[in-house]
Image (spheres, helix red, strand yellow):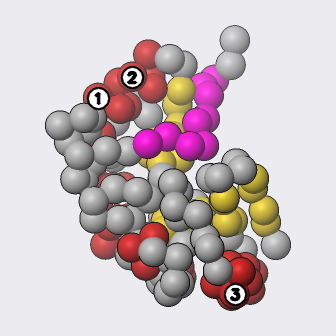
């Protein structure tokens, strides 16, 4: 018996792919499986790469039994080149940063992002190896 499980890599289809799944159906499925919280990847359409996108997910899921914890995009549009506005996303409720299904191809971008998050006391999650790092 446990109070609830946390999935740290759920795929959110809303916004952009609601024909596959939406926030309500994702939360209902998670609740049926014993999950109380889901950390969701930023690979939606549009990408969760700004404060407004994070706030929207938090607002749309606020009446659900399962808590959605958005993972903000590490880079703008998860393109791997320009670091996203991480400070704003943390203030809006992002719990970590990742480019989700897209890997960072440039070591310099990842190095800058790692330096940047040290001031935010935030996490960077690499989906390609499911490794969590905190500085």
Say which of 30 and 82 sits in front.
82
> 90 left or right of 113?
left
Secondary element at tag 1: helix
Q: Residue drawn at (50%, 17%), measured in percent from left and top?
A: 33
Above or below: residue 114 compared with residue 59: below
Q: CA distance from mark 2 to mark 3?
A: 39 Å
**Where is residue 29 drawn, in percent x and y?**
39, 22
**Where is residue 48 drawn, in percent x and y?**
38, 65
Above or below: residue 86 compared with residue 128: below
Tell me the quadrant of the picture where the N terminus can be found: top right
Say which of 26 and 88 sits in front.
26
Residue 4 is a magenta residue: yes
Secondary element at tag 3: helix
Residue 125 is a magenta residue: no
**Where is residue 42 drawn, in percent x and y?**
44, 59
Q: Residue drawn at (38%, 45%), measured in percent from left and top?
A: 12
Label disc, if present, on residue 25 of the rendered structure: 1
Q: Earlier in the sequence, mark 3 or mark 1?
A: 1
* Residue furthest right as drawn: 135
Which mark is in front, 2 or 3? Answer: 3
Label disc, if present, on residue 29 of the rendered structure: 2
Q: Does residue 89 appear in this view?
A: no
Residues in magenta?
Answer: 3-11
Label 3: which residue? 108
Say which of 48 and 129 sits in front.
129
Q: CA distance from mark 2 to mark 1?
A: 6 Å
């Amino acid at each position: 018996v446990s109070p609830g499980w946390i999935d740290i890599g759920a795929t959110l289809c809303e916004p952009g792919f609601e024909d596959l799944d939406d926030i309500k159906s994702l939360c209902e499925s998670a609740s049926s499986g014993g999950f109380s919280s889901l950390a969701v990847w930023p690979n939606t359409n549009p990408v969760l790469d700004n404060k407004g996108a994070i706030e929207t997910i938090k607002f749309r899921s606020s009446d659900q039994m399962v808590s959605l914890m958005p993972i903000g995009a590490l880079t703008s549009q998860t393109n791997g080149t320009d670091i996203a506005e991480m400070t704003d996303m943390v203030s809006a409720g992002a719990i970590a940063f990742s480019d989700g299904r897209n890997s960072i191809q440039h070591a310099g971008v990842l190095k800058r992002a790692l330096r940047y998050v040290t001031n935010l006391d935030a996490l960077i999650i690499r989906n390609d190896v499911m490794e969590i790092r905190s500085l």
